[in-house]
Amino acid sequence: MKRILLSLAAVLVALPVSLSAKDKTAEIKVISYNIRVGAAKDGTNSWEYRYPASAMMISEQKPDIFGLQEALDFQVHYLEEYCKGYKSVGVGREDGKHKGEHMSIFWNKKTTKLLKWGTFWLSETPDKPGKGWDADCIRTATWALMKDKATGKKYFYVNTHLDHIGWEARKNGLKLIVDRIDSINPKGLPMIITGDFNMEIDRPEFDLKKIMKNAREVAVKTDHIKTFNGWGKGGTENQETIDYIWFKGFSTCTEYETITKKYMDRAYISDHYPIKATLVF
């Protein structure tokens, strides 16, 4: 009888742990990184001199998921090869295949699973390549439905790069992103949007701030370092905050960081600082 009671007690002690595992809190570490297009002639800041620093940054920061902007095919392939454990999706904006800049989404295969993904163009014809509104360049958004392996919780992730010239293109592009995700997300799963938005937060075109939270502004621990560094040329007057991590459906953001750490003793690994946020379901 004593042995039976002891076994029963052991089961009762273990039971709450098993039940609570289903409701385990999940942390998602997110990075947004404008890597600077690899074909640019930037002197000693050109890709040929700084490429290992980008892989070192990702390998040290270990995000669960990150969005890459301005990357050409060879930059995407390099990170896939040298950032062990990561895989990516995305297409070239010029032809929907390999040509032009990619808005790639990378994920850590140990912690995260890709369920489905797609790319659309920020234009009046989002299902085929083309410029939209008053844009100077072809612009895209890549989306993915992801699952956190530890908890099974799902969320949508969108990565984009808005136009640097057209104000209508920025405003309408953001609206298109939100409408598109709402249409494929009828259950209202949590959502993350990262990217280079090419505008400061106080612009009236930034309608996104009405429906989503800016990680920089709401994080428990945060900073206010400008995200565009311009390789340090022109001092602080040439710097802007135009890169963002937005979210909704998560309970909180515990930390936001503008990553200014040197890698390979380089003052800048891109003309944009990578930014990182930790989101909690």
Image (cartoon, rainbow, N blue to C red):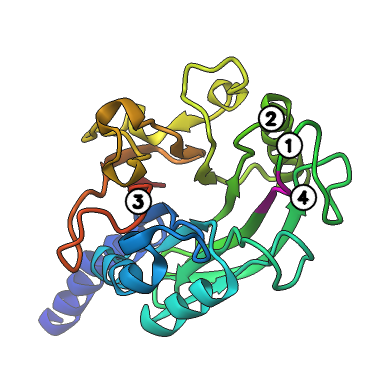
Q: CA distance from mark 1 to mark 4?
A: 12 Å
Residue density around tag 1, few if under 14, some if 14–19, many if 20 or more, within 10 Å = many
Q: Nearer the viewer, mark 3 or mark 2?
A: 2
Q: Mark 2 highlights which residue? A: 166
Classify mark 3: residues with Cα within 10 Å, few (<14), some (14-19) or many (20+): many
Residue 104 percent location from the top left of the image: 57, 63
Q: How many marks?
A: 4
- Residues at marks 2 and 1 touching, judged by CB atoms closer than 8 Å: yes
| Disc with the residue nearer the chain's start (1 vs 3) | 1
Which disc, if any, is residue 274?
Answer: 3
Q: CA distance from mark 2 to mark 1?
A: 5 Å
The one of 141 and 218 positioned closer to us in this rendering = 141
> Which amino acid is tagged 1?
Ala
Q: Would residue 119 be found to the left or right of residue 67 on screen?
A: right
Q: Which residue is mark 1?
A: 135
What residue sits 54% from the left and 72% below the top? 88
Report x, y in % for residue 69.
Answer: 52, 55
If you read the primary sequence from the N terminus, does the residue marked by circle 4 or circle 3 appear first?
4
Q: Disc 4 and disc 2: Cα gap in Å?
A: 15 Å
Q: Is residue 278 above or below residue 64?
A: above
Identify which residue is drawn at 45% across, 79% down: 78
Tell me if residue 109 is in the magenta stretch.
Answer: no
The magenta segment is 137-141
